[in-house]
Amino acid sequence: MIEKKLKIKVHIKNNRWADGSFPNTPDGEAVFTITRKRFAEAIKKFEGMDQHLDTFVDWDTDNFNSSMADTDVLLTWDLPMKNLAQVAPNLKWIHCIGAGVEHMLPMDWIPNGVVLTNNKGVHAAKAGEFGLMSILMLHSHMPAVVTNQRLKVYDSLYASPIAGKTLVVIGPGSLGGAAAKKVQALGVHVIGVNRSGRGVDGCDEVVMTDQLDKVLPRADYLLTATPDTPETRGLLNRRRLNLMKKTAGIVNIGRAALIDYVALCDKLDEGSLRGAILDVFDPEPIAKSSRLWHTKNLIITPHISADDGDGYVPMTLELFLRNMQLFLTHKPLLNPIQSERGY
Ligand code: OXD
């Protein structure tokens, strides 16, 4: 039961697209914008909720300071963090419309008593399909086929069904776990790598991160789906990439900082990996001068692996409003970020 109380002011901060920002394309802006219409559509499923909310839809920081003065809840990708307690003295909860919150690190700016939540779960279905597609593409030599096509090379690259191969997933959480389940269903042996070593659906084995060196040489395929934190940054360095089979393929749908892309490009160019499919970069968009564009057996996808083009905002709002029910009834929120961990 939602108890009767004064209205909760929700400030929705949308971002106009801009290079080097989020979103960084006009298409991205269309996918991620929370319009008044989309909000009204989503709230229909939550009977009586609208009478508790006073919602202000904004762009960038057009009205940020004036509106945040009496805002209780902020729904956004990012925000000006400086002096937040003074700018928004009533603020109690910030929901980030992304899964990754590395742009908010370090989280020493969060005022006492303010909870930060993220969009975990919204990406799973799309990431699962994209992960499965990418592993099958690597298995069928598609990065090499595309490279050959550019070079007008007609080379027959055969592959058998994938059953019996081994996939290592670094970060078998919401995104990586969804991909693991789909790939495992094809008879692939899946090894998860996470901080705790605790079992995960879709993984036949799970090892702790400190066992990574032991499992990398077993990987026919490697899928990485980690947040960008001090612990994950640079984890897949040149030394570790060198532990992998020459025939192995790599997919990254998490964050670029996990992998040494220079070392990866070296290995791809010299033919000591089967191929790679990378969806995340730093910076995004990739500079026109980047070596990535012409690296052999590399397929670039522009950060589209986990974002459902039609469903992203409806799913985000469904999660946000479910959380709002908890907020209104003073219950713990879903997806709280642990600021010291950074995810
Ligand atoms: C996210 C992403 O963090 O799509 O939401 O990368």
Image: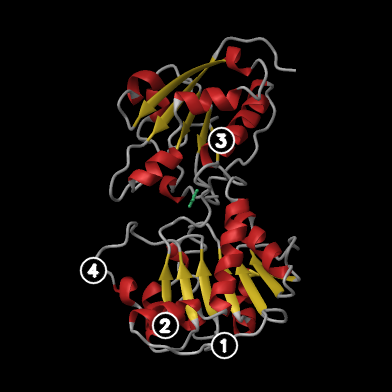
Identify which residue, 154 or 274, lies in the foreground. 154
C-beta proximity under 8 Å, tags 3 and 4: no
Q: Secondary structure at mark 3?
A: helix
Question: In terms of sequence position, does the residue under pointer 3 or pointer 4 come before the other?
Answer: 4
Q: Is mark 1 within 8 Å of ligand 1?
A: no
Q: Mark 3 packing: few (<14 Cα in 10 Å), some, or many (20+)?
A: some
Identify which residue, 33 or 168, lies in the foreground. 33
Q: Nearer the viewer, mark 1 or mark 2?
A: 1
Task: Name the residue at the left extreme.
Answer: 289
Residue at mark 1 to residue at mark 2: CA–CA distance: 19 Å
Question: In terms of sequence position, does the residue under pointer 1 or pointer 2 come before the other?
Answer: 1
Q: Mark 2 packing: few (<14 Cα in 10 Å), some, or many (20+)?
A: many
**Where residue 158 is drawn, which disc sits there?**
1
The residue where tag 3 is placed is 314
Q: Quadrant of residue 50?
A: top right
Q: Residue 19 in the image: x percent, y percent?
A: 28, 49
Question: In terms of sequence position, does the residue under pointer 2 or pointer 4 come before the other?
Answer: 2
The residue where tag 2 is placed is 268
Residue at mark 2 to residue at mark 3: CA–CA distance: 39 Å
